[in-house]
Image (cartoon, grey):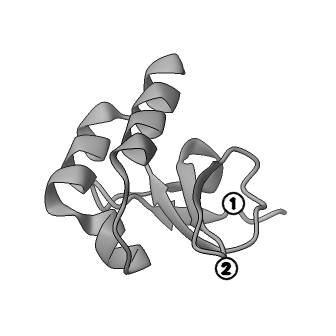
Amino acid sequence: MKRIVQRMCMGCNNKKDKKDLIRIVLNKSGEITIDKTGKLEGRGAYICDSIECLEKVIKTKRLERVFNTKIEEQIYNKLRGVIIDK
């Protein structure tokens, strides 16, 4: 039987199946992207597919602390677009 991989959401701190979360990646060149495939190379962070979790991550600046870098507002806007589109 295949094991289901789980990750923790940065917003609500609940463990969910990896495929149900949105992955945000910081690659070696310092670029932050949204990983739809879940296979991009780099440091990954996960967030639920809910606007409440995203707003909590923005308010607490958790993504900035995880990646140890300043996050541009356009990254957050892209995330809002991905969450609303689904």
Q: Residues within 10 Å of mark 2 (few under 14, many from 20)?
A: few
The residue at 57%/54% (across/down) is 23
Disc 2 is placed on an element classified as: loop
Residue 4: give its label. 1
Which image quadrant is residue 26 in?
bottom right
Residue 28: give its label. 2
Q: On the picture, is 11 further left or further right than 21? A: left
Which image quadrant is residue 63 in?
bottom left
The residue at 74%/66% (across/down) is 3
The residue at 67%/74% (across/down) is 42
Image spot of residue 75 (x, y percent):
44, 46
Along the viewing direction, whichever of 22 and 66 lies nearer the viewer: 66
Image spot of residue 18 (x, y percent):
61, 55
Amino acid at the residue labelled 2: Lys
Q: On the picture, is 38 further left or further right than 73? A: right
Amino acid at the residue labelled 1: Ile
- Name, please, the residue furthest toward the left: 59
Q: On the picture, is 5 further left or further right than 68? A: right
Image spot of residue 46 (x, y percent):
49, 58
Image spot of residue 74 (x, y percent):
41, 41
Of the two numbered discs 1 and 2 in the rendering, the one whose residue sits closer to the viewer: 2
Q: Is residue 49 visible?
A: no
Give the Cα separation between the discs numbered 1 and 2: 28 Å
The residue at 44%/21% (across/down) is 84
Quadrant where the image shows the C terminus: top right
Q: Earlier in the sequence, mark 1 or mark 2?
A: 1
Quadrant where the image shows the N terminus: bottom right
Disc 1 is placed on an element classified as: loop
